[in-house]
């Protein structure tokens, strides 16, 4: 079965530090890739997505992610984090060539940004 | 545009009871998916409905079932509740088509005593 790995479970950064969160998946076919964010007390929100074209995708709030097909990776980056980025981040993968719309999620990374 | 609406927000039940959760998708979204979120297992896919038909099902026992109505609203039912069913149940809706993301509701937090 498809699996998604997020290697960092808890990350603590100071404001203005750079961020990179890892995401690797196992499915060998065509994929759609997503990063969602869950701020404290709020619902999951889409940060960015990749489904075709330029493997470097830009999302909201200054986040970007790069799809590297050969590494089955879709890492999330932000050059300078803010205190308001404190949240839990989830990577998700959809097997787009199967017609299944189900998302397989990683276990999440809790980001804590200290002022 | 209203988001995905889930009711109720909180629910407390006892073992052996059954429960029904409701989800109203974003207007125009015909695909509705359900997920279970727990601290131990994370976010796990339950099932997906489109045009009143279940298209995919995750690896959950038959006690978990769902349906979708002609207006795309969906319900999820869990029978013979067990302590391990305590979780946040999330509903997500989407448009169909390549790359369309799922939009999530706030969830229903179900606690089993």
Image (cartoon, coloured by chain):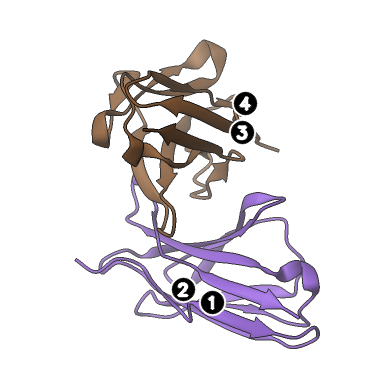
Of pointers 1 and 2, the one earlier in the residue sequence: 2
Residue located beneath label 2 in the image? B52
Nearer-the-camera pick, B44 or B50 = B44
Residue name at image x 25 percent, y 29 percent: A62
Numbered disc in front, either 3 or 2: 3
Which structural element holds mark 3?
A: loop
Residue name at image x 34 percent, y 27 percent: A81
Q: Chain A is drawn in which colour?
A: brown
Name the residue at the left extreme. B1
Chain letter of the residue beneath label 1 in the structure image: B
Residue B50, quarter of the rendered image: bottom left
Numbered disc in front, either 3 or 1: 3
Do callouts 3 and 2 mark residues in contact (Cβ within 8 Å)? no
Q: How far apart are marks 4 and 1 (CA)?
A: 36 Å
Which structural element holds mark 4?
A: loop
Q: In this view, does B5 lie to the left or right of B113?
A: left
Chain letter of the residue beneath label 2 in the structure image: B
Which structural element holds mark 2?
A: loop
Residue located beneath label 3 in the image? A9
Task: Check the image and report above or below for B105 versus A96.
Answer: below
Name the residue at the front extreme. A115
Residue located beneath label 1 in the image? B67
Do callouts 2 and 4 mark residues in contact (Cβ within 8 Å)? no
Identify by letter the chain in purple: B
């Amino acid at each position: 079965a498809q699996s998604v790995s997020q290697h960092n479970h808890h990350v603590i950064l100071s404001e203005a530090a750079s961020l990179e969160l890892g995401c690797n998946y196992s499915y060998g076919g065509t994929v759609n890739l997503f990063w969602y964010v869950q701020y404290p007390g709020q619902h999951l929100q889409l940060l960015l997505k990749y489904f075709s074209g330029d493997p470097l995708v830009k999302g909201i709030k200054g986040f970007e992610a790069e799809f590297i097909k050969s590494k089955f990776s879709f890492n999330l980056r932000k050059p300078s984090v803010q205190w308001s980025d404190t949240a839990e981040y989830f990577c998700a993968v959809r097997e787009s060539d199967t017609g299944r719309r189900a998302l397989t999620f990683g276990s999440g990374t809790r980001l804590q940004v200290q002022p | 545009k209203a988001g995905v609406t889930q009711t109720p927000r909180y629910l407390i039940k006892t073992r052996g009871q059954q429960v029904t959760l409701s989800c109203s998708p974003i207007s125009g979204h015909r695909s509705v998916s359900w997920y279970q979120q727990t601290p131990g297992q994370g976010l796990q896919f339950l099932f997906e409905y489109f045009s009143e038909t279940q298209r995919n099902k995750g690896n959950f026992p038959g006690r978990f079932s769902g349906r979708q109505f002609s207006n795309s609203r969906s319900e999820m039912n869990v029978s013979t509740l067990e302590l391990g069913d305590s979780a946040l149940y999330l509903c997500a809706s989407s448009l169909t088509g390549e790359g369309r993301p799922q939009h999530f509701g706030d969830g229903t937090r179900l606690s089993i005593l």
